[in-house]
Image (cartoon, grey):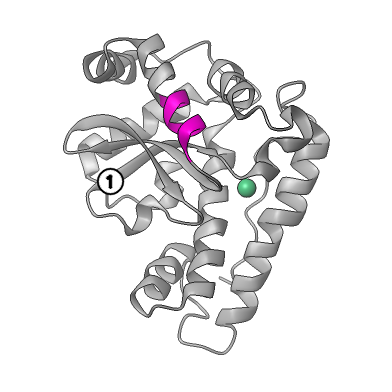
Amino acid sequence: MPLTQTPLPFDHRALEPYMSASTIDFHYGKHHKAYVDYTVAAIKGTTLEDASLQEIVRASRISHDVRLFNNSAQAWNHDFFWKSITPSAAPGPTGTLAEWLTRDFGGIEEFKNAFTQEAVAHFASGWAWLVLENERLRVTSYHDADTPLVHEGVAPIFTADLWEHAYYLDYQNARGSFLDAFLGYLVDWRGASGRLELAIHRGRHVELEELTL
Ligand code: FE2
């Protein structure tokens, strides 16, 4: 099936006031779209023309096609970001996710503090991630377009986009305020729980479609 931009899983106004329609329109409609458009144009007529987005990301990393890697990885990271947030967010994690966050961070608030610290301290553009690695939950951040897809043994649970285009219209330079809204009102804890259960039972070799329940 030809590669196209994955539909936004909610209305562009659905995350207000925590993420404005204007931010969504620029972020999804301009930034994310541009990454997909470049990728589609770059693979046309090549052996990757019918490949999945994940296959394109991994193949371009192996072949050192930096521009294709950056654009395809950004396309995948954005797909994952839109599935990491929801207009009907539960107030917090439950079940195994809550238990393991408490086990590995000392508590839910301690986890939120660790995630926020990682994200705020991350210099320049990139992504903050909650990941499962070696049976433990941990927070990390990757620069630019880097993605868990090319990190062995890392299964992503959810991500926060740290590029300024993700928050500047709503929060200007206050990345910490964006993270407070992200963790307090936007994270799809039910989806995160589903991805954790899949990662526990299937290992990291789960497909994006499975990780984005
Ligand atoms: Fe972005």
Q: Position of residue 34 (x, y in %)?
A: 70, 63
Query: Residue 24, relative to residue 189: is it above or below?
Result: below
> Does dot 1 land on a helix, a strand or a loop?
strand
Q: Could you tell whether 173 is left or right of 125 in the image?
A: right
Residue span colored magenta? 115-122
Q: Position of residue 194 (x, y in %)?
A: 38, 30
Query: Residue 173, relative to residue 57: is it above or below?
Result: above
Q: Position of residue 189 (x, y in %)?
A: 47, 22
Q: In percent of the image, x 48 and y 69: which residue is there? A: 69
Query: Residue 113, relative to residue 35: is it above or below?
Result: above
**Which residue extends farthest right?**
22
Nearest the eye: 194 or 132: 132
Amino acid under disc 1? Val
Residue 121 forms part of the magenta stretch: yes
Would you name the residue on which mark 1 appears? 154
Q: Could you tell whether 1 is left or right of 157 in the image?
A: right
Q: Could you tell whether 185 is left or right of 96 in the image?
A: right
Q: Residues within 10 Å of mark 1 (few under 14, many from 20)?
A: many
**Which residue extends farthest bottom?**
45
Tell me where residue 196 sits by quadrant. Answer: top left
Total residue callouts: 1
Label 1, ligand 1: CB separation under 8 Å: no
Residue 157 forms part of the magenta stretch: no
Magenta-drawn stretch, dominant element (helix, strand or loop): helix
Q: In percent of the image, x 42 and y 74: which residue is there? A: 60
Nearest the eye: 37 or 125: 125
Q: Position of residue 9 (x, y in %)?
A: 65, 40
Name the quarter where the N terminus is drawn.
bottom right
Q: In percent of the image, x 23 and y 43: which residue is there? A: 202
Q: In percent of the image, x 58 and y 19: which residue is there? A: 180
